[in-house]
Image: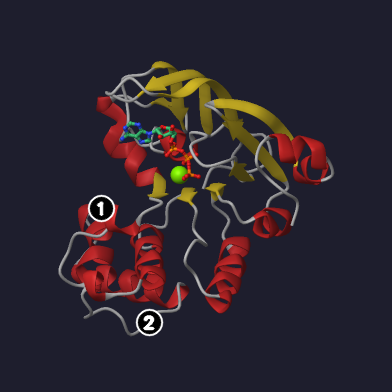
Amino acid sequence: MTAINGTSQEPILHVHDLAFSYPDGRQALAGVTMHVDAGEKVALVGPNGAGKSTLMLHFNGILKGGSGRIRVAGMDVVKENLGVIRARVGLVFQNPDDQLFSTTVFDDVAFGPLHMGYAAAEVRRRVQAALELVGIADFAPRMPHHLSVGERKRVALATVLAMDPSILVLDEPTAGLDPRGRRSLIHLLRGLEATMLVSTHDMALVAELFPRTIVLDRGRVVADGPTAGIMADPAFLEAHGLEAP
Ligand SMILES: Nc1ncnc2c1ncn2[C@@H]1O[C@H](COP(=O)(O)OP(=O)(O)OP(=O)(O)O)[C@@H](O)[C@H]1O
Ligand SMILES: [Mg+2]
């Protein structure tokens, strides 16, 4: 992983004045500027439709064509760099059905490590380790589409953990998890050294795990700073459809 305290020359995630409209004309991002330094764990919050998922999908080039600039680990997010960037950024979609496409959990989780060129034994080791991390060690032979939502959510996270990425971009990772699953996810995320940007409506999770919070509303950053300060301002939270835990 990139050294944590300040030795890298620029933020590991860097977005400058990003504006993006969907093909139907709806503007989802209206000039977003934000950055995340190597080793930081940052929460991304905001009401439904704020643009959180849209922003996240830009970090590995799934969405493109807007104006502004996005850099990841010192590279512009452009076609030539996408292979390297996708190996560095583990992006977990809000909807696990967008992530899972194989007939077994094993194949879904093995896809990334295989693509990275690991030998079969190492792929198997990574798949098993990732499934254990998300608490579904015995799920390898199962069919992703015959799993519950929370189980699929865990598989989706495992597909990314199996690649051991230095940057994790997680879109609502606790949505659909039961309390025990949520608790073990918090424990897992706390223990990972990866840089993290995590979108969530789970404000208790934000307070517990993320020293810094970025608030997005209507495609704009409306706050970016220490979580404690943001949580201590009920009027601000209410104005942006949020509340303290
Ligand atoms: N494929 C799409 N085509 C057109 N508009 C879209 C599309 N996906 C999202 N949008 C719109 O873009 C805006 C931002 O959506 P986005 O999914 O990024 O919000 P979000 O902050 O992730 O919300 P949520 O908390 O509900 O996940 C919304 O107005 C949404 O309706
Ligand atoms: Mg979303």
In the picture provided, is 176 more to the left or to the right than 10? left
Figure check: 231 above or below 31: below
Q: How many marks?
A: 2
Q: Helix, strand, or loop for circle 2?
A: loop
Q: Residue 137, labelled with which disc?
A: 2
Numbered disc 1: secondary structure = loop
Q: Is mark 1 within 8 Å of ligand 2?
A: no
Where residue 220 appears, as percent x and y from the top left, is 57, 24
* Front residue (pair 9, 95): 95
Residue annotated with mark 1: 116
**Marks 1/2: CA distance?**
22 Å
Q: Is residue 121 above or below residue 95?
A: below
- Quadrant containing ligand 2 reads top left
Q: Looking at the picture, does residue 97 appear above or below residue 213?
A: below
Pick whichever of labels 1 and 2 is earlier in the sequence.
1
Picture coordinates of residue 125 (x, y %)?
A: 32, 74
Quadrant containing the C terminus in the rendered view: bottom right
Q: Is residue 170 above or below residue 238?
A: below
> Residue 150: which quarter of the image?
bottom left
Q: Residue at x 37, y 57 (%)?
A: 160
Outermost residue to the bottom: 138
Q: Is residue 111 visible?
A: yes
Tell whether 232 sits left or right of 107: right
Mark 1 is surrounded, within 10 Å at the Cα level, by few (under 14), some (14 to 19) or many (20 or more) other residues, namely few
Crowding at dot 2, Cα within 10 Å, few <14 / some 14-19 / many 20+, comes out as few
Residue 8 seen in this snapshot:
no
